[in-house]
C-alpha cells in the first residue's frame, strides 16, 4: 500500500484479556518498528525488525508483550493479560533501510484502552 | 531517565510570526536528530533532520539548529501558518541508526490566525 496501515484503529478490552494489533508496512520496507505513546509521554520504543535478522526486543516492557513479523512483511504485536497501564496508542513504522536519514513512516496507530 | 526533553508542553504563536520549539538531550552518543510533526488521529510524520557534523539545516520555512556543546536543538518555523498547528516531537539517534529513536514528550504548537 501507499502507507503504513494499522488495525484496528481503536480497541477497548477488559483487563486480563489478550489483544493483537496488526501492522502492514510499506511494501518493500525491510525495517519495521513498534512504538507506543502513553498519555502525556513521548514515543517509547518497543521492538525492531530488520529483514531476516533476529528482532531487537529490548524495549518490550514485560514478557506479556510479544511481536512477530511473518514473511518479512506484516507484523502482529500481542499483549497478553492486558493491564490498565497498557493503555496507550501503539504506533508501527517502517523504513527502507536501517539508516535513519529521512526518518521512518508511521502508521496512524491503534488506540488501546484497557478497562 | 529522559534522555530527550521537550520542556514546553505547549506554545502559541500568531500567524506570520516565528515559532521556536526547543529540545534538550543528555546522551552525548546521540549524533543524529530529527523532528516529527503529529496531527490528531494520525501517525507522526518526518519533518527535518540534522547530523551532529552540522549546526544548521534548512528546508523551506523550517530550520533546525544544533548546539552540541549545550546539547540543545531547536526548530524554527518562519512564517508560522495555522496548518502548522500540531504536536512536534524531537527525536535522537546514536550512530545514525534507525534501530531505535529516542523521542521527547512533544510540544503542542498552536498558530493563531
Image (spheres, rainbow, N blue to C red):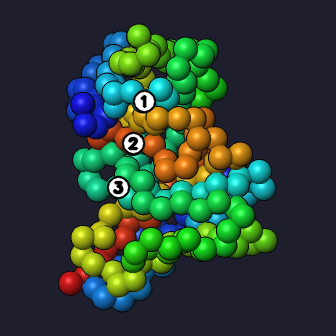
Q: Is residue B38 left or right of residue B4?
A: left
The outermost residue toward the front is A28
Q: Quadrant of the C terminus of chain B?
A: bottom left
Q: Give the residue at x 45% y 71%.
A: B59
Residue A29 marker = 1
Q: Is residue B57 left or right of residue A84?
A: right
Q: Are marks 2 and 3 on the same chain?
A: no
Residue A85 lies, in percent from the top left, at 45, 32
Q: Is residue B83 left or right of residue B3?
A: left
Asked whether the beta carbons under mark 2 and mark 1 sit within 8 Å of each other, the answer is: yes
Residue B81 lies, in percent from the top left, at 27, 78
Q: Helix, strand, or loop for circle 2? A: strand
Mark 3 belongs to chain: B
The answer to whether any part of residue B2 appears in the image is: no
Eyeballing the image, is B24 above or below B41?
below
The alpha-carbon separation of the residues under discs 2 and 3 comes to: 12 Å
Amino acid at each position: 500500500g501507499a502507507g503504513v496501515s494499522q488495525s484496528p484503529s481503536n480497541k477497548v478490552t477488559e483487563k486480563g484479556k489478550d489483544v493483537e494489533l496488526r501492522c502492514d508496512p510499506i511494501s518493500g520496507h525491510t525495517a519495521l518498528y513498534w512504538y507506543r505513546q502513553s498519555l502525556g509521554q513521548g514515543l517509547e520504543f518497543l521492538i525492531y525488525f530488520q529483514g531476516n535478522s533476529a528482532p531487537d526486543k529490548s524495549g518490550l516492557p514485560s514478557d506479556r508483550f510479544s511481536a512477530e513479523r511473518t514473511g518479512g512483511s506484516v507484523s502482529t504485536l500481542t499483549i497478553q493479560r492486558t493491564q490498565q497501564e497498557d493503555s496507550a496508542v501503539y504506533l508501527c513504522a517502517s523504513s527502507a533501510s536501517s539508516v535513519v536519514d529521512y526518518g521512518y513512516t508511521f502508521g496512524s496507530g491503534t488506540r488501546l484502552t484497557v478497562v | 531517565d529522559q534522555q530527550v526533553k521537550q520542556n514546553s508542553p505547549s506554545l502559541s504563536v500568531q500567524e506570520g510570526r516565528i515559532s521556536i520549539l526547543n529540545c534538550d538531550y543528555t546522551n552525548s552518543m546521540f549524533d543524529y536528530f530529527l523532528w516529527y510533526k503529529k496531527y490528531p488521529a494520525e501517525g507522526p510524520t518526518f519533518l527535518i533532520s540534522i547530523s551532529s557534523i552540522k549546526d544548521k539545516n534548512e528546508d523551506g520555512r523550517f530550520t533546525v539548529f544544533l548546539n552540541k556543546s549545550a546539547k540543545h536543538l531547536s526548530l524554527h518555523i518562519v512564517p508560522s501558518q495555522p496548518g502548522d498547528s500540531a504536536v512536534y516531537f524531537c527525536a535522537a539517534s546514536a550512530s545514525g541508526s534507525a534501530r531505535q529513536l529516542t523521542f521527547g514528550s512533544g510540544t503542542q504548537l498552536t498558530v493563531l490566525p
